[in-house]
Image (spheres, grey):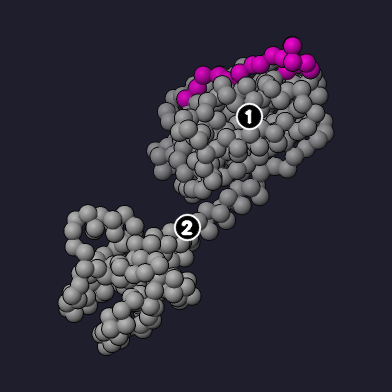
Amino acid sequence: MFQILVIDDDSTIQIFLKRLLEKQGYEVITACDGEEGIAKAIATHPALIICDWIMPVLNGLEVCNYIKTDPNLSTSFFILLTSLDSVSDRVKGLDAGADDFITKPIEQNELKARVRAGLRLHQLSRDLQIQKQLLETELAQAAEYVRSLLPLPITEPLHINSCFIPSRQLGGDCFDYYWLDDDYLAVYLLDTAGHGLKATLPSISVLNLLRSRALKSLNYYQPSDVLRGLNETFQMNYQNDKYFTIWYGVYHRITQQLVYASAGHPPAVLVSGKSPKNTEVQLLRTPGMPVGMFPEAKYVDACCQIEKFSNLYIFSDGAYEITKADGTLWSLDGLIQILVSLQNTLDCPLEQVLNYLIALNSKETFDDDLSILQIQFD
């Protein structure tokens, strides 16, 4: 049975509406002013509220505004009962959040019809809210599943830290690092286009394939060959039109050489030097289209020597495509400046980077997944 709350300081109107609506099979609660009405709304969560506009202390607009800004009450259908009938008055009511109006004197058939329509819309709003909550729960569970697959930090013989902050919608970020043998470390980070589970599933598939080395024909020590094999396996025509960018590198700890290749991914940033005066920055990327976009895409390797006291940062574009409080978009150059400024700090640079990005973001959550790997070669 639907529950309806009637708020009116006129006891005659209260009695009239209560009797009329109870005959229609509804449960009716009454309140004689705005404060009592809000208290009863909080206690009962009515499906529909009929509230007089002109009342002492709190008028109907103020009650409506409170109800519609309370997440627990926002789906209650709100009807303003008024003798005011001008366009400007109706605009005020709509701006306050009112869903409908009934003009005095009350016409019974019109009231019944508007109540029936309001309850249908309330039920639709409730259904949508429930579906939204279920979807958010599923996305949160999916984010936890992705997080459970990601590697733990390591301290020997290199220090590798990482962070993964999923967006509200969950994107397609994923990363991994592991030893191919005693001397060669493989590391990569990928970002699937789009959001939601359709973006997450291809990322997990890539992680499982690379971690298990299931593609037997690949040379996992040669980054360009890995990208070529992934491009052949994950063509977007067969993957729900999903493509992904990726940065893949292999580090040889004996020679301290890093071989890498990228496919449309932001460059990895290598910051070297043990004092601010001799800090050097290298952007590590190679030409190559995102994986899955074109069947005949070509990928090439590049190589660099890793000096002592170096930090390598690999990240997704969610680490710098951040909307600031003034509405402007942050940039890759801004992120690089932060990484350089933290090169010689004693505390964990990655933690400080995250604190800065969280403070920079103008929203409660990030618009896109934020993933960063930090490898310390000291």
Packing grade of label 1 (10 A; few <14, some 14-19, many >=20) is many
The residue under label 2 is 135
Which quarter of the rendered picture does the C terminus lie within? top right
Which residue sits at x=52%, y=39%? Answer: 362
Please name the amino acid that badge 1 sits on: Ile
* Magenta segment boundaries in residue numbering: 272-289
x and y percentages locating residue 232 in the rendered image: 49, 32
Please name the amino acid that badge 2 sits on: Leu
Secondary structure under tag 2 reads helix
Packing grade of label 2 (10 A; few <14, some 14-19, many >=20) is some
Which residue sits at x=68%, y=21%? Answer: 340
Q: Residue furthest front?
A: 56
Separation of disc 1 and disc 2 at Cα?
A: 30 Å
x and y percentages locating residue 186 in the rendered image: 69, 31
x and y percentages locating residue 112 in the rendered image: 22, 77
Secondary structure under tag 1 reads strand
Which residue sits at x=54%, y=45%? Answer: 365
Q: Nearer the viewer, residue 217 or 82?
A: 82
x and y percentages locating residue 58 in the rendered image: 39, 66
Q: Nearer the viewer, residue 207 or 75?
A: 75
Taking 287 as reference, is 95 above or below it?
below
Which residue sits at x=77%, y=26%? Answer: 345
The residue under label 1 is 314
Residue 126 shows in the view:
no
Taking 151 as reference, is 356 above or below it?
above
User: Counting residues from the N terminus, which is met first, the one under dot 1 or under dot 2?
Assistant: 2
Q: Is residue 45 left or right of residue 282?
A: left
Q: Nearer the viewer, residue 40 or 329?
A: 40
Taking 54 as reference, is 216 above or below it?
above
